[in-house]
Image (tube, rainbow, N blue to C red):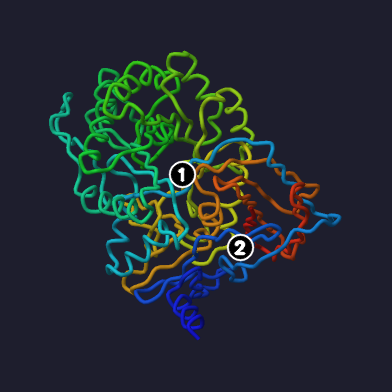
Amino acid sequence: MLFIYLFLFLLTAGYCRADDCLSRDYDQGSIVCVCNSDYCDTVPRPEKVEQPQLLVYTSNKAGSRFEQTTGQFEQSKAADNQILINSEQKFQTILGWGGAFTDATGINIDSLDEQLQEKLLRSYFAEDGIEYSMCRVPIGGTDFSTHGYSYDDGDVDEDLVNFALADEDHQYKIPLIKKALDLSDNNLRLFASAWTAPKWMKTNGEYDGRGFLVQELYQTWADYFVKFLDSYQSEGIDFWGITTGNEPSLASVPLNKINSVGWNSTEMGMWVLNNLGPSIRNSNHSDINILILDDQRFYLPRFVDEALVDNATREYIDGIAVHWYMNEYYPASLLTDTHNNFPEMFILSTEACNGVNSKLGAVVLGSWERGEAYSIDIIEDLSNWAGGWVDWNMVLDLDGGPTYIENFVDSPVIVNATGGEFYKQPMFYHLGHFSKFVPNGSVRIDASSDSENVAFVAFQRPDDGIAVVVVNKNDEVVPVALVDGSRGTVQVELSERSITTILYW
């Protein structure tokens, strides 16, 4: 009898048990999971199973979300659609998964009551959430702010005497970052990216448009980066990385309204060599990772080749940051080409979002296709040496904002503040199939197939477990045979339009 009472207590306390999705259908192909002050779905960390057992987690267009089942390896002859796992052949180490602490993210979280804020942050960062492990922090304002700003607006200030963090940092960024760090037990790597310099540092005197950095102020701009890192450190927040700046190509885009600092590859290389690199390495943040480019894949490898033609410049750079826009027109093999040119550097996907100039609208509640677009891009990037994948805004409102230039887009979590609830989009779960089951320190391993029916990628986790993520974009069930020479073969039925994570030790 005591055992029964103990079992019931553990069950009701939620130990090792998921809280199911509270689904709602907006007639957009799939469902969203609704969270309110009283309820929000969860997914506990998987518990290790002994050989020959394995765990299977499935989310699909029909409405399953992290549905857990079990399977078993057998010493049997494999059927068609084999996925062959070879853990002896290893590739890159996983650095992290996550999103960005934009002003819009903070504004939307702040619009909810405290209980709901807690549920939203737990959904992203806690053990019973999808356990994001890497987040991007804008240095100053972006297009997803309520107005344009920098940390030293006003008159020319070459010595940065008037540099100061903005109200947005103190209200929307720093408090949420600290909560996320607590929820993740400090297992959260932060990297920073600047969108714009103060107007007086730029050739056109504007936050946006065709503006480049005034050459005489190259050192001032590098000092600005160090000032930012110092200011956040004084608030108890340290950074793992910093990029050379968000999308320098924007300054060359006609009618662009997004805040930017334009660079060509040669000038960026000079700035890194003579200003940014020495300033960072001689600061209190000398161990921080410096990432170059932070722009679209189609600039690879040319931009980095040209910027780092001098080996002395190359020594300052630790990684290469890429974005996903227009990836459908440029092959992921460009990442492999870049890795081959710079094998000592990591590659990180640092921004992605759906809904840009979409005929379907910025926010589409329940779009399975947008979730698939994420997971397919992740698989392609990771299969070509990317060490992680970071989304753009973590949270937006029903319009896809706020954004002061009306650049509305979609997000994995959408807030309905007046309704007192938020919605987890299919994108949230597609990302979670990686971030939840492929922790930092995992290593991509070899996986191959005799079939093109599904997309997949495999990893060895730090606990020596194997995680295989498989996407079935077909409108019918696809049976696959997962073959691991050290364990045997297991048959897995992939439901139509699904993403599945297979986990075993």
Residue 161 vertical position relative to residue 99 in the rendered view, above or below: above
- Relative depth, front residue between 297 and 504: 504
* Image disc number at residue 351: 1
Which corner quadrant of the image does residue 244 belong to? top left
At x 47% / y 67%, what residue is drawn? 42
Name the spot of residue 265 as percent of width and height, x first: 45, 22
- Pointer 1: residues within 10 angstroms few (<14), some, or many (20+)? many
At x 51% / y 55%, what residue is drawn? 436
State whether residue 378 appears in this view: no
Measure how far apart labels 1 and 2 are at the Cα level: 26 Å
At x 60% / y 56%, what residue is drawn? 372
Task: Name the amino acid type tagged 1.
Answer: Glu
Most extreme residue toward the bottom, as rendered?
1
Most extreme residue toward the right, as rendered?
77
**SS of the residue under disc 2:** strand
Which corner quadrant of the image does residue 284 belong to? top left
Circle 2 sits on which residue? 57
Most extreme residue toward the front, as rendered?
2
- Relative depth, front residue between 14 and 146: 14
Q: Is residue 360 left or right of residue 166?
A: right
